[in-house]
Amino acid sequence: MKKSLKLLIVFLVLILLLVGCNSSQNNSENDVTTPVKAKHLKFSSAVSENSTWQYGAEKFAELIEERTNGRYVIDIYTSDQLTSGNQIKALEALQMGTCDFDIRSILLYTNLDVRFTSIMMPWLVPSFDAADEALAGPGGEAIANLVNENGMKFIAFGESGFRQLTNNVRAIESPEDLNGIKLRVPALNMYFTMFNELGANPTTMNMGEVFASIQQAVIDGQENPVDVINSFKINEVCKYMTLWNCSYDPIVMSASPHTWEKLSEEDQKIFAQAGKEAMEYQKQKSRESYNKLVEELGKTMEINELTDEQIKTFREAVQPVYDEWVPQIGEDMMSYFGL
C-alpha cells in the first residue's frame, strides 16, 4: 500500500513538471515577436540603369525601406521591362494597378491630355532656372492636377533635361540642314508638326528599337536628352550631335491610385516625401553629369552647340507650330510657362 502511494506521488510530480515545462515553452514562444513580411512594390522606369533616372529610383527605394522599417520594398524594373518596352502600356499599367510606381518623361503623358505638351513647346523654356521656377509655381501645380485627373497619383518632378539631336547625315546648324533627314521622334503629335515644319521626315518607334534602326540605316537619327542618348548608347551609331536645347523635358514620378489608396495616411506622407527627395536627388545628379556626358559623347560624335542667334532662327521657323498648338493646349495653360 505504501509502495503504491509512493508511485502515485512520483507520477503526479512528473505530470506537474511536464505541464510546467510546456507552459514555460508556450510563454517563451509568445514572447517572440513575429517579423512583419515585407510588401514588395513594382517601380517602372522607362530607361536603363545607366541613366541618372536610376539614381532617383534607387534613392526612393532606399528611403522607403528605411523609413518604413522594412515593411515595404521597392523592386525597380528598368527599360519598361514590365511592358516589354512599350511606354504607352506602362502608363496603362500604372492606371490599372499592375505597376505601383513609375518615372517617365512628361511627353508620354501627352497621349492622355494635350495640355501636358505646354512645357515642351519648342524653344519655350530657356534655362534650368526658368524650368525650376515654372514647375515650382502654378505651372507645376497645373501639371500635377492633370496627372491626377488622368488616373494616376502625382508624386514629384524629376528631370530628363533639354532634348538634343543626333544623326548620321550632317551637322545641323540651320533649319535647312534638316531637309529630308529621317528621325525617330517620340509619340508626341506636336513633335511631328515641328519636324515636318523644319523639313525633316519624322517617324516613331519604341526607344529599344532605335539603336538597331540607326545602325541599319532605317532611320538617320533621333532626338533625346543627353542622359537618354548616353543610356541607349546612341553615340555608337551616330556621327553628329547638335546641342540645340529644343524642349525642356521633365520627368514625372507617379503612383498607381490603387496602390496609394491602400497606404495608411502616415505611409502616404512617407512615400510622398521620399518621392520628392528622390527626384531632387535625381535632378541634381542629372545636372552634375551633363558636361561630363557631353565630353564622353564627344569622343565618338562630332558635337556642335548652337549659338543664341542660330536658336533664334529655329524659333522663328517653328512659329506655325505655335499657331496650330496653342489653341489646342489653351492660352491659360501656356501662360504658366511664359507665353
Image (cartoon, rainbow, N blue to C red):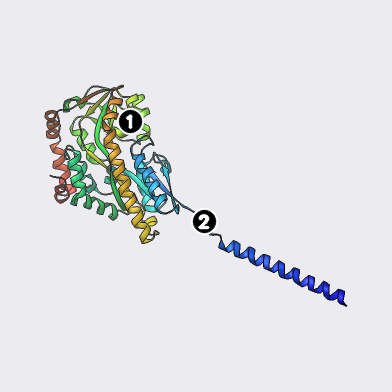
Answer left or right for 32 relative to 231. Answer: right
The answer to whether residue 84 is left or right of residue 245 is: right
Camera-nearest label, 1 or 2: 2
**How many circles with numbers are drawn on the protein?**
2
Quarter of the image that includes the N terminus: bottom right
Quadrant occupied by the C terminus: top left
- Per the image, the residue denoted by label 2 is 35
> In this picture, is 90 found above or below 243?
below
- Give the percent coordinates (x, y) of residue 101: 37, 49
Of labels 1 and 2, earlier in sequence is: 2
Cα–Cα gap, marks 1 and 2? 43 Å
Determine whether the residue tagged by mark 2 lies in a helix, strand or loop: loop
Q: Would residue 186 be seen by someone viewing this image from the given angle?
A: no
Residue 54: image location, x then y, percent:
36, 39
Q: Secondary structure at mark 1?
A: helix
Q: Is residue 153 above or below residue 289?
A: below
Query: Does the rendering let one see residue 69?
Result: yes
Residue at which label 1 appears: 230
Q: Position of residue 306 (x, y in %)?
A: 17, 27
Kind of residue sitting beneath label 2 = Pro
Q: Which three-letter amino acid code belongs to the residue tagged 1?
A: Asn
Q: Is residue 305 above or below residue 190?
A: above
**CB atoms at circles 1 and 2 under 8 Å apart?**
no
Residue 322 lies in quadrant: top left
- Find residue 236 and report its horizontal and vertical position in percent: 34, 24
User: In front here: 14 or 164?
Assistant: 14
Q: Quadrant of residue 172?
A: top left
| Residue 158 quadrant | top left
Label 1 crowd (10 A; few <14 / some 14-19 / many >=20): some
